[in-house]
Amino acid sequence: MCKPAIRGVIPPVLTPFGENGEVDYDKHVRNLRRWNEAPLAGCVVLGSNSEAIFLDEDEKLRLVEVSAEHIDPSRLLIVGTGLESTRATVRFTNQVARLGARAALVLTPFYYSPHMTEEALSRFFTEVADQARVPILIYNVPKFTRLNVSPDLVGRLSRHPNILGMKDSLGDIDQLSRFRACAAEDFNVMVGAASVWCPALALGIEAGILALANVAPQECAEVQRLYRAGRRAEAEALHVRLLPVNAAVTATFGVAGLKYAAELRGYEAGWVRAPLLPLKPEERARVSAVMKQAGLV
Amino acid sequence: MCKPAIRGVIPPVLTPFGENGEVDYDKHVRNLRRWNEAPLAGCVVLGSNSEAIFLDEDEKLRLVEVSAEHIDPSRLLIVGTGLESTRATVRFTNQVARLGARAALVLTPFYYSPHMTEEALSRFFTEVADQARVPILIYNVPKFTRLNVSPDLVGRLSRHPNILGMKDSLGDIDQLSRFRACAAEDFNVMVGAASVWCPALALGIEAGILALANVAPQECAEVQRLYRAGRRAEAEALHVRLLPVNAAVTATFGVAGLKYAAELRGYEAGWVRAPLLPLKPEERARVSAVMKQAGLV
Amino acid sequence: MCKPAIRGVIPPVLTPFGENGEVDYDKHVRNLRRWNEAPLAGCVVLGSNSEAIFLDEDEKLRLVEVSAEHIDPSRLLIVGTGLESTRATVRFTNQVARLGARAALVLTPFYYSPHMTEEALSRFFTEVADQARVPILIYNVPKFTRLNVSPDLVGRLSRHPNILGMKDSLGDIDQLSRFRACAAEDFNVMVGAASVWCPALALGIEAGILALANVAPQECAEVQRLYRAGRRAEAEALHVRLLPVNAAVTATFGVAGLKYAAELRGYEAGWVRAPLLPLKPEERARVSAVMKQAGLV
Amino acid sequence: MCKPAIRGVIPPVLTPFGENGEVDYDKHVRNLRRWNEAPLAGCVVLGSNSEAIFLDEDEKLRLVEVSAEHIDPSRLLIVGTGLESTRATVRFTNQVARLGARAALVLTPFYYSPHMTEEALSRFFTEVADQARVPILIYNVPKFTRLNVSPDLVGRLSRHPNILGMKDSLGDIDQLSRFRACAAEDFNVMVGAASVWCPALALGIEAGILALANVAPQECAEVQRLYRAGRRAEAEALHVRLLPVNAAVTATFGVAGLKYAAELRGYEAGWVRAPLLPLKPEERARVSAVMKQAGLV
């Protein structure tokens, strides 16, 4: 039996904090409602851009609960559940499954990265997938983990009935292409770097979990729509126009940049949690300029 | 008022797990009793070698409680409390302070390492130190975090009244020497790599938080005793004899190697938690051989 | 006055060696004649794929001379001239200029990389450009040099009247886009990684110095022709078909892979120079398989 | 038959340049005469600190010739001969052998580092050693090459009759100790980082090829003399006093720092070659301060 195909744009959504550092669930709900109106395929809650690593378990569970309640029910609620140990990852994955998560995005464990060999990662994902009550997605993000999941390993894991796909945030075209070549036919290779959104579509990839989609959901979806409609020149032109925004909200300014850009577009993003620093005035000015130049404000 | 000086060897102790992955607190207590008999200055609980990253909060708190109860009361109970967010680190530090921790070993936050600038780290340690009810120690372990705390930053932070010292596990002699040169007079620069234990003593460093001290506490302490007694040739000869064991229980085989070596010396270490892998038979043989050659079994 | 625009595909050509390790100039000439027949914009001699680092000065000069004589005179002869010192780079650049080089591709000096600061690189390229009798191109190839030329520095250097453009082999789309954004209007940003050839065209980049073009010159040029003709779906399909070949002849098997693939397509590539190793039989089989699958043999 | 043992301190000597960038051979001779008066075991010419990578072949040969003529004939003249190709390294090694070099220090080839596998390096050193008319020394300097020669490979190569020893500039104590453990009894493991000079002596290593010995030859030798005489506390105290100078003339300011420090001690060092930058006034002040504090000026 074939795994269901995931198609479209999915934002790994930010978590709004108040100035005191508390999660502001109301703002989160209002953001969700706006994302619901955009042509998106779903949402990732508790991904890297949600500052999940800063949240305690109660906050995480509440965010999942609230998200499950308010996301358009036709859409995919994916929850980031990767923790360092196998048992904690399984337990947390099954907790969020009960709360309504439809799939779990599982980060490679990485604290002991010198010992996270191919064999260790293979067992980890296999054991999590065996025990998880929802399908899992492998999350490859070498920028944060300094680990790369090899195409060979993806090939083997892609045959597991409960491993639905992967999100790759490295964004190396050669490797993306090898992920596709090595993986089972029905395995969902999703791209996690908006800088290669259009090139990934050209590789036949059909889903993007894109930080940029927090602030430009319509635009990210429009790239794909144009592309599918055969209007590739327009797709590319739009993609290229978005590139400087993407750089600003990811590599250059990180989550703080993403949150500021989101505010500029009317989302309620609030503060980042310490030790992340808020943008300085001149950094805010640079983000604004980039947003203006791209026509987003 | 001067900060108290820390002198001697301190093992960052392992956490025994049963085959089912549960913490075995009884084994931990029996290990503590044995460490109590060795000439050590204290213990670190919840450090990198304790697989703390795999423990849930209840397990962590229980381990601290049990350790506080059973450690020789004249000795220093240090608890690893670094979490990714400032607020969680403060909260957890103050929880373990109530349970008897005498100092907190605070890892640099590192998930968002590209954004963990000098300024971000400076604020983080300052805010944690301001709010912590026990003195804190900076923990620099680039092998796991890919971040290095600079000597300049150490110099500034060393003047904070509640920052008692640091553990440096990079083990670069030039930088260790610059930490000492930049830091305030009463700041405790402690070395966290047994490979440079003897060279660190030569730099005037007086404390070592050494994974190797889990399995060779007497020997690690003896290096320092001989050194202080002016018997440097003997100190060095012993240090050199221990080097291959140190490599085996850290860089080469990690925590799994440390636990196996500890078992060989009569400690009760049990299993590692997945996704760490247990040693394969041939790896166990290599650890045994190295232990034998060093005269430890 | 505007700098001339470079448009099209340019192979950084391989250097054929005999089994004894001698340069085989006759084979080089025969290869050049075949490349002359392909729709290419020129050739790079003495680039990374030519094993230039293994050639002595006489061999280099002879190769330039022979290339100048046999390249279609309407095409651009670019010569790799970057050496570690400023003075050697200037001297060698001017030697090859006298022999017919039309532009010099200048690698970032990198042996003392920790000291190759933005200021050092800025002075280096400025001084070389000031003294060179042909226009120069900046060559950014972090894979080999571990140095990256920043978009800001490219922006400043792009205003120098004798710096014609750059070849970027990092292939990061975000950074490519920032090179374009920072550089002067008439500065030629060329891509040096075939994995992003199609995406680079979408960014408005018009030239590619592509190792892959040694073995698939028509195909690389066809990608661009289709693209310009508005037949983007076909351009992309062809680009995607070539990706596995590109990976094989660059990242996976390096120059030895490139040379074997070239032989399969009827070029005369011969041996690699030691310490590079020739492909093992199973590696040759993998390259063959990839070439077949791409329809290149 | 046993390989001869190398014992003592050997500076990898700097190359004096005039303001116009020309090698100043007279200054080199005067420096050599001063080093001859210090208790050194020899000299390395054309090492990393000589800016050899910036010298053309004529300059290199002339430097070797002049050095062979003026070095105290009882001392070891070692010449850096590593080039990227096997054949060029062999040829150049044999040229300098004819001019009086007694051993060749051979850098790992590194431009194509992703392809410099254990097998490629093994063949390289074996072929060079087979064909060289003087004994060779393996030069491991990951700071510049990003390659590390493994203890296993050192173990195998150490059995080659014409591979006399190695210089390791990584300075990791664990690995140094494993080099010693893996290598044949009569293989000379020499340390190339003054930061671990005293710790290396404790490992039983008997020779140091130390950049610091350019500016503090007596002091580096005195560390070893005191150590051998059983006056280890004094050896260590002196070693520790020199550490900040060593950091300044290597990691922090590189060759430019080394040359300025050498001038302060009465050597004639002159300028660095571009693209290396001369020290700025404030950098010179920092080097002076460090030299003063160490009692070297």
Image: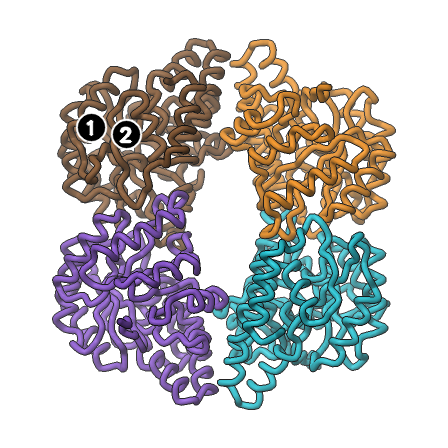
Chain colours: A purple, B brown, C cyan, D orange
Going by the image, does B14 lie left or right of C7? left
Look at the picture and state if D82 lies above or below D76: below
> Is residue B222 found left or right of C73 in the rendered image?
left
Q: Which of the chains bears the disc numbered 1?
A: B
Secondary element type, mark 2:
loop
| Residue occupied by mark 2 | B13
User: Is B214 above or below relative to D140?
Assistant: above
Q: CA distance from mark 1 to mark 2?
A: 9 Å
Q: In the picture provided, is D5 more to the left or to the right than B274?
A: right
Residue type at tag 2:
Val
Residues at discs 1 and 2 in contact (Cβ within 8 Å): yes
Residue at the spot x=46%, y=26% of the render? Answer: B244
> The N terminus of chain C appears in which quarter of the rendering?
bottom right
* Residue A223 percent coordinates (x, y): 39, 82
| Amino acid type, mark 1 | His
Chain hosting mark 2? B
State the mark number for residue D3.
none
Give x and y (percent) for residue A24. Answer: 16, 64
Question: Which is nearer the N-term, disc 1 or disc 2?
Answer: 2
Q: For mark 1, what is the residue?
A: B28
- The front one of A248 and B83 is B83
